[in-house]
Image (spheres, helix red, strand yellow):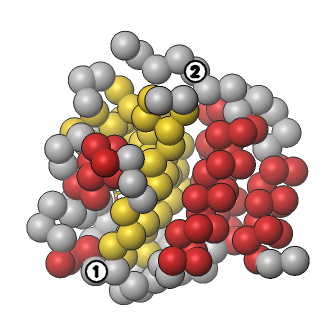
Amino acid sequence: MTNATMHRRQLAALLDTRDWLTNAAQTCAFIKQQIDELNWVGFYLQRQPRTLALGPFQGLPACNPIPFDQGVCGVAARTRQTQRVDDVHAVPDHIACDAASRSELVVPLVVGDQLWGVLDLDSPQPARFSFEDQTMIEGLCAVFLEASDIEAIAA
Ligand code: SME
């Protein structure tokens, strides 16, 4: 069994409620425990107008809110494409919540045709996230969304 498959199965077993808030908190704790060299992992939730609000996370207190037109999280929200940044210092738009962060992975969470939020991972290691890591974390996001009753997104 690959590591990615093992992580997916472990997270699916951990998320034994349909409550998205509980599951989001558990998902952060699981990722922080299982994935090496992370200084921050957490959810930002879509709010109106075109803003991300801080959700459950593990790490230092973080920036809130993040408008869609700012930061790596904003790019992920606007484009709905995973953002994998090897060197955050090379990204002028990067929002430094924790000065220790050197690389970042942001996965958009899309439900139906709506952006529900993003999952953001930060590492103090440059180029911490490989393409395989990206695929693995995207898989964990799919487990979270499948396990959870997602609340309606404010219009
Ligand atoms: N670095 C992010 C902001 C969120 S913190 O890393 C927790 C960004 O540029 O969007």
Q: Position of residue 16 (x, y in %)?
A: 85, 39
Q: Quadrant of ligand 1?
A: bottom left
Identify the residue position indicated by label 2 in the image.
Answer: 151
**Tag 2 secondary structure:** loop
Q: Position of residue 6 (x, y in %)?
A: 82, 69
**In the image, 107: left or right of 91?**
right
Q: Position of residue 74 (x, y in %)?
A: 27, 48
Identify the residue position indicated by label 1 in the image.
Answer: 87
Q: What is the three-letter code of the residue carrying label 1?
A: Asp
Seen at 81% across and 50% down, the residue is 12
Residue lying farthest bottom?
126
Seen at 57% across and 74% down, the residue is 133
Q: Quadrant of residue 138?
A: bottom right
Residue 41 visible in rendering: yes
Q: Position of residue 79 (x, y in %)?
A: 31, 48
Disc 1 C-beta below 8 A from ligand 1: no
Whether 103 is drawn above or below 95: the answer is below
For mark 2, does the 10 Å Cα neighbourhood hold few (<14), some (14 to 19), or many (20 or more) residues? few
Seen at 54% across and 33% down, the residue is 111
Residue 32 visible in rendering: no
